[in-house]
Image (spheres, rainbow, N blue to C red):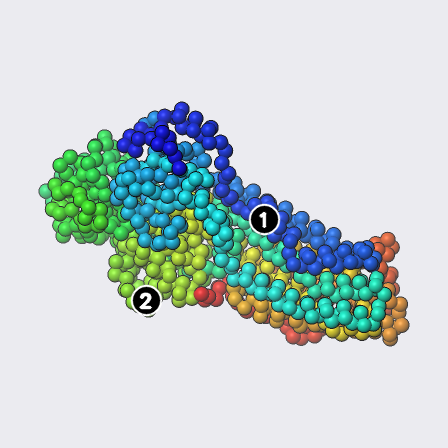
Amino acid sequence: MASRSELADPRSSDGLPEAEARRRLEARGAERRPATSRSYGSIVRANVFTLFNLVLLVFGAATLIYADWRDALFLGILVANTTIGIVQEVRAKHALDRLAALVAPTATVVRDGRPRRLPVGEVVIGDRVLVAPGDQLVADGRLASSAGLALDESILSGESNSVVRAVGDDVRSGSFVAEGDGAYVITAVGPESYAERIAGEARAFRHPRSPLELALNRLLIWLVVVMAPLGALLIASLWLRDRPIGSAVSTATAGAVSMVPEGLMLLASLTYAVAAIRLAGHGALAQQLNAIESLASADVICLDKTGTLTEAALRVVDHAPAPGVDAPELEAALARYAASSPTRNGTLDAIAAAHAAPAAEVGAHVPFASRRRWSALRVGADTDVLGAPELFDLDPALAERAGAEAAAGRRVVAIARTEAPLDDESADGRLPDGLRPLGLVVLSERLRADARETVGFFLAQGIELKVLSGDAPDTVAAIAADVGIPSSGPPLDGRELPEDAAALTELALRAAVVGRISPEGKRRVVEALRDAGRYVAMVGDGVNDVPALKAARLAIAQGSGAQMAKSVADVVLVRGDFAAVPPMVAEGRQVLRNVQRVANLFVTKSVFAAVLILTIGTSATAYPLLPRHLSLAASLTIGIPAFFLALAPSSGPWRTTGFLRAVASFAIPAGAAAGLGVVSGYLFALHALDLPTIEARTVATSTLILVGLYLVLALEAPGRRRRIAVLGLCAAMAAAYVVVLVLPSVRGFFALAAADPGIVLTAIVAAAFPVAALEMMGLRADRIQPGSAQPPRTG
């Protein structure tokens, strides 16, 4: 903590002298910056130290010691895959770090009597920091001034309710200003601050795994459960048959390595990383990589009106004086209020732009809060209150005017005056007594140029949009109708939401527009949708959106919004452009679709290996494939195609549930058919044609590659443009295999024979049977993976 000599006088509004602040900063020295993405060490560990890498390294070492080094070719592929994964994740880290710098928290510090916006790292003990709604407290301190200041300390204490703080109270870094404004003098920064002292616990937190991540983990567990007994069976069989050590190691390696889906997790993380880079290109910072998957899963998007459907900036378009009040008096009252208010918002900025006036000395102040829907200033002997028109006792004609303007989609605010002072009850939400309405000010919002196109995209994708706004219901409904959001009934009034959970759920599912809704009301609506089984995304930018952002499955914050909103968001729209969300959704669905498709190839390989072990691995017959054959076949039919398929544009069905069932429906018949085709072709060549082992193994390898390339094609639905590209990819892989067979040196390296007509014909016939069987079964990834362009209703 700071010594007394280091603290500024809390009663002083001048803050520290700039020279003294620089001296303290230099004396403190450089501080460790908080991580904005995964560390380099974490990236390397995640890509290198895995269970399957360990299995491959053990068998690779055994092969290098006891067998032919060429059968350890899979180690080179392992190194290449791991390197690619590390490089791509580092690229994603760099992109995320650059975007994170744009939305990093800052502080408004008073130095030499003037406020300055500074990076958090330049704040020192003794600085006077000004805070307003949405600001994060960047260091520990003591409150020097307060105007209805309430802090959200949930990140520190877990308590969800805001806590009101008074002058002299200690405040802690990590808190956010939920309401009001004030200033505090810093008493501790960096490692000495409360938030930093509990950072070890905070860093231990991990974002909940997404459905796809959980499914992949379950899949790997099942593969390990199957691999262990099969590997033990193969090794026991080799031991009991007393095979030579070199042959035994080669056979065991061939069986075990082919069961390992070594590239599956790599491709999943690689796809997430590349998608994060692409999102960065759209101006979106993915603060959680699995948020990319959630973008694909969302079937309801809740959003505020301002900043998403409409431009954030407002402009004054008209005034309506109350009876007995002339226009100059109304305009003067508005001008004084806008110029003098210690806190700012879009409404006050628009009024100040339309009516300039010198700032007056404010005796008392109640800042705007969403739950109150009004703010107030005490200037001299008058108290002016600015708020929603329905809060005041307006003349019928004036009330009718307010309703008509709101129905036309405009924002209407009333101003009233009283001689009654502001007191503690006013800060708690009770309006001052004796208010005399002065009139209305009408403000207009402009629709975003791309709002209709963005809404059209979501509707075409089967995603519902629900507008939750603090503005009047008719105003919100008019804007929603303008941009094309369908509504089955009148807009709801957020002040009349039912307490009964079932009734609220029914309303939340039915209504497309809710106006005059409080922050707590937004949260309740989002929770009701979520608990009804909908995958809810919430888009917001203000403190009033934070409870709903926390409750949503996916939180999207505007980059221009409050620090509090950005801190709880999974994705931050750095440029604040809602039109960036559609390409993000498309990117997320592509990730989900591609990872699910390529997973079929890796699991098919594991099933194929199990079939080979059970049919021929325990017999006295030589194993049909050497490890180098499997490395070659896996590269041409899985590794290279999967890399392109995982990163390429795609279309077609996708789903967020039933992943394991869908993969098993494809991989089990495909792997079994491939295994039986390879075994039958190998045994026919070995015994019926009496071919040497090297030629019989050439038949087995060729059969496996032909069936494998067919399976790559089977992953694509017919009639799609991408299928042509995949067909070209398969042709290139087949040509590469032909080159291997034609070039003597390469053919010798892989222990293959020259392809004479007998070998070619046998391989084609052996591959034709499993292909025909799978065709008759109608094996297609799009058929066995049910779904549509719309996600299922998941909780």
Residue 641 image position (x, y, % from top left):
68, 57
Q: Decide which of 136, 730 is in the foreground and name it.
A: 136
* Image point (49%, 55%), residue name: 207
Residue flagged by tag 2: what amino acid is it?
Ala
* Image point (44%, 61%), residue name: 535
* Image point (64%, 53%), residue name: 49
Mark 2 vs 1: CB contact within 8 A: no
The reply to whether residue 586 is visible in this rendering is: no
Q: Decide which of 219, 298 is in the foreground and name it.
A: 219
Identify the residue under disc 2: 501
Residue flagged by tag 1: what amino acid is it?
Ser
Residue 412 image position (x, y, % from top left):
24, 47
Q: Report helix, strand or loop for mark 2.
A: helix
Q: Is residue 560 above or below residue 476?
A: above
Identify the residue under disc 1: 42
Quarter of the image where one finds residue 726: bottom right
Res 396 label? none
Q: Is residue 243 above or below residue 76?
A: below
- In primary-sequence order, the first of circles 2 and 1 is 1
Residue 471 image position (x, y, % from top left):
28, 51
Quadrant assignment for the C terminus:
bottom left
Q: Residues within 10 Å of mark 1 (few under 14, many from 20)?
A: few
